[in-house]
Image (cartoon, helix red, strand yellow):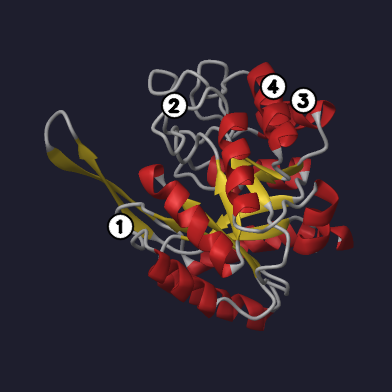
Amino acid sequence: MGLNDKVIVTCAMSGVVTSRAQCPAIPYTVEDYAREALRAYEAGAAVLHIHARDDDGAPDYSAARYRCLGDAIRAACPIILNFSTGTLDPEGRKAPHITDYKPEIGALNMGSMNYAKFNPKKKSWVFDFVFENSFEYIASLLTKMNAASVKPELECFDTGHVASVDPFLELGLLKAPLDFSFVMGVVGGVRATARHLAFMADNAPPGSTWKVVGISREQWTLCAAALALGGNIRVGLEDNFYLPDGAMARSNGDLVAQGVRLARSSGREVASVAEARAMLGLNLR
């Protein structure tokens, strides 16, 4: 990708960790998801990254829930659907929603990592868990995605995860053009700096598309870096609640609109859904 290429804006609108106690705009119900999807689409997002929740906000990994969400969103707007596969839940790790609903894109974690977070009340670190994604497990998800004609989005939380594509390319489980997400700012993963982002982008195979996923306060700085480097961007309430001025977003649409303004102020135009499909190779499906 180059500086003159259009920018694909992805909206990650919910996640499964955050709650309405932290940000009231996080969607829980099917109606919430459809409404937030429309706001993101109208603001300029071409791709929607989804973690399913039940009506009370708890994670829901069932194929039935993803089907309800996908149908409601598709009825609301023609945005590209990207379903998450990231979970420690035993049933969720089988990714039934990928083979059942066949979204256009499936997010795929490309390696294991440690998770840690700081508890400001106790002023101490909490060492939560190891997020295990073995090569064998990645291969099993790729097999399911290929059978369902779902394009994998390669989520890389550290620099070594980028090189994890090599054996899968040799085995034919991955095929060019590849699409990467460089997730930055998670403790245990790569540091959230423009230099680390450039290094990861330089190590992606030629012809790949890529986006930055900046967590929390680093999001806007990293989005600016990605735009300068010719990459795509992801925004949304899964990653960050706040606009650059510190105000909390009232919806995912607020964050997408800010991402669009940032892209245009850097001299790049935002891709439509049809253009994003072509850029990601989804028209071959």
Q: Secondary structure at mark 1?
A: loop
Q: Amino acid at mark 2?
A: Met
The nearer-to-camera label among 1 and 2 is 2
Q: Of the numbered discs in the image, which one, if any, rests on residue 188?
A: 1
The nearer-to-camera label among 4 and 3 is 4
Q: Which quadrant is home to the N terminus?
A: bottom right
Residue at the image position 46 percent from the left and 35 percent from the top:
243
Residue that mark 4 sits on: 35
Left or right: where does residue 34 sit relative to residue 265? Answer: right
Q: Are marks 1 and 2 in contact (CB under 8 Å)?
A: no
Q: Sequence order check: which comes first, mark 2 or mark 4?
A: 4
Q: CA distance from mark 1 to mark 2?
A: 26 Å
Q: Sequence order check: which comes first, mark 1 or mark 4?
A: 4
Q: Of the numbered discs in the image, which one, if any, rests on residue 72?
A: 3
**Is residue 155 visible from the viewing direction of this image?**
no
Q: How many marks?
A: 4
Residue that mark 2 sits on: 248
Q: Sequence order check: which comes first, mark 1 or mark 2?
A: 1
Q: Sequence order check: which comes first, mark 4 or mark 3?
A: 4
Nearest to the observer: residue 152 or residue 223: 223
